[in-house]
């Protein structure tokens, strides 16, 4: 489990936690990107990345494209579909020289499900689950299939 600040509560055997830190005196900073790369040395079955905020999205995308399919992460977005746009923006923040369409194609090849959780006063709930079927570079659109969409009853 990799987090900026320890927030996720998981109680399971064989769990290894990594937490990022800012530079402090003689101790150097440790970034999420560095922790993601270091986690691969442990040959994990699952990787949980607390939140994607920037360039670490590129490292996560690389990791997903090399066979680490048991991976889960979060990204803040207004909808499940907009999470793909946000993820793309974060990959672009890595300053890697990749074509925009290649990034989107890699995202479509790597991500399988997007779960959107909404927050309303006093509660959180799953509002949508989308399956990523692919990416069409001609139309610049992802092919998304709704698996679940919550009817507005709140």
Image (cartoon, rainbow, N blue to C red):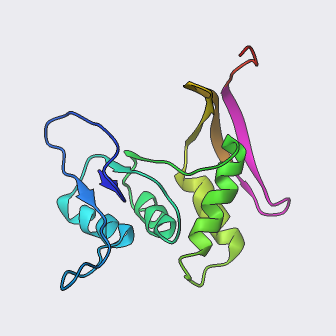
Residue at (55, 82) in percent of width and height: 96
From the top left corner, tell me how far across and down residue 34 is, in percent. 32, 73
Is 24 placed left or right of 52 in the picture?
left
Q: Is residue 94 above or below residue 59?
A: below
Q: Quadrant of residue 120?
A: top right
Q: Residue furthest right?
A: 139
Task: Using the image, determine if residue 95 lies above or below residue 7.
Answer: below
Image quadrant where one finds the C terminus: top right
Would you say residue 136 sits in the magenta stretch? Answer: yes
Residue in the picture at 85% in, 59% down: 139
The residue located at (50%, 64%) in the rendering is 57
Q: Point out the stretch of residues depicted in magenta.
A: 135-148
How would you classify the magenta stretch by its main secondary structure? strand
- Residue 129 horizontal/vertical position (percent): 62, 32
Residue 77 vertical placement versus 65 (above, below) = above
State the image coordinates of residue 115 (x, y, percent, origin top left).
58, 36
Residue at 24% across, 52% down: 44
Does residue 77 show up magenta in the picture? no
């Amino acid at each position: 489990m990799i987090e900026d600040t320890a927030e996720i509560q998981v109680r399971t055997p064989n769990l290894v936690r990594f937490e990022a830190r800012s530079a402090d005196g003689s101790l150097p900073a440790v970034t999420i990107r560095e922790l993601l790369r270091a986690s691969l040395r442990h040959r994990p079955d699952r990787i949980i990345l607390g939140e994607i905020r920037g360039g670490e999205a590129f490292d996560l995308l690389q990791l997903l494209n090399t066979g680490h399919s048991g991976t889960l992460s979060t990204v803040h977005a207004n909808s499940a579909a907009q999470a793909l746009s946000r993820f793309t923006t974060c990959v672009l923040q890595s300053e890697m020289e990749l074509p925009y369409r290649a990034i989107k194609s890699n995202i479509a090849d790597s991500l399988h499900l997007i779960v959107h959780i909404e927050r309303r006063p006093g509660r959180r709930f799953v509002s949508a689950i989308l399956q990523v079927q692919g990416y069409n570079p001609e139309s610049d659109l992802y092919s998304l299939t709704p698996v679940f969409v919550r009817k507005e009853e709140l």
